[in-house]
């Protein structure tokens, strides 16, 4: 049994639909007093249904449910030995405000007030659930396909998950350092392909630029030392409760060196990783105002 909860606008409805596709029986907005009753049925009579139709259940819980009244039912479930997981979706306040404005919806805890006030109140009410969450996923910089991949990894591929989503971001210093970066690395010490005519119009994703950048021993040493440091840092960030890490790799224009090294770092960290990892290139197509991400 999975309790799907988190901030309004962080992606709970999408998550329930994805879990339904994975064979979960999903219930959205089940009133708090009924959760315990349903759990008793789920582990009792309903578990004996032929074919196991209710073998996996996901319950959507949000501000409409009555978050403050959830604590006792969940504590009672533990006392009764009924196991469950809490899947908590979060996002930055600025992202949540933007999502509400785009959909022209009022926040459920501030139907006639400011969205910011509703978000602040919801964070207070969700404090217990967040502290006791099995999984915490920050969707601030996620696309729908990223969210789907994480859910598939956790509930379909049975991969371990470390409550951390790592975003590797390449950028150009000429366009400014990303404001949300936790760690910033400057790779301008490497020769710049921009000054080579046949490479100038290519990017770090092209083999020509990749082979040029990686032809220097310094590039390999940098990646080796950076990856070793991150393998040390990431578990310690998780211990401190961090659920999102933005690693920014920058060069002059964000088109050649940083893109190549960000891709290489992504490949290195993705091998047997228990954390969600994504690579994005903020300035790779700055001239055409397009942004490529994966």
Image (cartoon, helix red, strand yellow):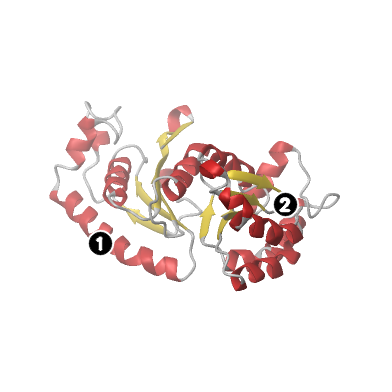
Image point (43%, 45%), residue name: 156
Where 198 falls versus 277 (above or below)? above
Image point (53%, 53%), residue name: 138
**What's the CA distance linking mark 1 and mark 2?**
45 Å
Q: Residue furthest right?
A: 112
Asked if residue 215 shows in the view, the reply is yes
Where 139 falls versus 70 (above or below)? above
- 1 and 2 marks in contact (CB < 8 Å): no
Q: Nearer the viewer, residue 262 or 53?
A: 53
Image point (67%, 63%), residue name: 126
* Image coords of residue 224 (percent x, y): 21, 56
Relative horizontal placement of residue 150, taking residue 139 as reference (left or right): left
Q: Nearer the viewer, residue 127 or 118?
A: 127
Give the position of the N terminus as an image quadrant: bottom right
Where 26 falls versus 72 (above or below)? above
What is the secondary structure assignment of the residue under circle 1?
Answer: helix
Asked if residue 5 shows in the view, the reply is no
* Image coords of residue 106 (percent x, y): 78, 45
**Which of disc 2 and disc 1 is earlier in sequence?**
2
Q: Which residue is mark 1?
A: 228
Badge 1: few (under 14), some or many (20 or more) residues near its Cα, within 10 Å? few
For residue 203, the mark is none
Badge 2: few (under 14), some or many (20 or more) residues near its Cα, within 10 Å? some
> How many labels, in total?
2
For residue 30, the mark is 2
* Image coords of residue 136 (percent x, y): 52, 58
* Image coords of residue 175 (percent x, y): 45, 43
């Amino acid at each position: 049994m999975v309790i799907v909860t988190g901030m309004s606008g962080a992606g709970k409805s999408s998550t329930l639909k994805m879990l339904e596709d994975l064979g979960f029986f999903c219930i959205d907005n089940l009133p708090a007093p009924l959760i315990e009753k349903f759990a008793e049925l789920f582990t009792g009579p309903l578990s004996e249904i032929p074919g196991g139709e209710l073998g996996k259940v996901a319950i959507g819980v949000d501000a409409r449910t009555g978050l403050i009244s959830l604590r006792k039912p969940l504590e009672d479930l533990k006392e009764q030995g009924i196991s469950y997981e809490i899947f908590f979706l979060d996002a930055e306040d600025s992202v949540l405000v933007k999502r509400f404005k785009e959909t022209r919806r009022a926040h459920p805890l501030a139907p006639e007030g400011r969205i910011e006030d509703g978000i602040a109140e919801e964070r207070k009410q969700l404090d217990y659930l967040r502290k006791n969450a099995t999984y915490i996923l920050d969707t601030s910089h996620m696309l729908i396909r990223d969210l789907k991949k994480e859910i598939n990894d956790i509930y379909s591929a049975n991969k371990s998950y470390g409550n951390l989503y790592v975003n590797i971001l390449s950028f150009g210093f000429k366009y400014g350092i990303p404001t949300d970066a936790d760690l910033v690395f400057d790779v301008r010490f490497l020769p710049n392909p921009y000054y080579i005519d046949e490479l100038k119009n290519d990017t770090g994703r092209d083999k020509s630029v990749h082979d040029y950048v990686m032809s220097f021993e310094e590039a390999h040493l940098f990646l080796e030392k950076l990856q070793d440091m991150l393998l040390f840092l990431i578990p310690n960030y998780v211990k401190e409760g961090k659920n999102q890490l933005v690693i920014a790799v920058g060069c002059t224009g964000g088109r050649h060196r940083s893109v190549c090294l960000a891709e290489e770092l992504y490949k290195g960290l993705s091998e047997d990783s228990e954390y969600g990892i994504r690579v994005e290139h903020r300035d790779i197509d700055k001239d055409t105002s397009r942004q490529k991400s994966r």
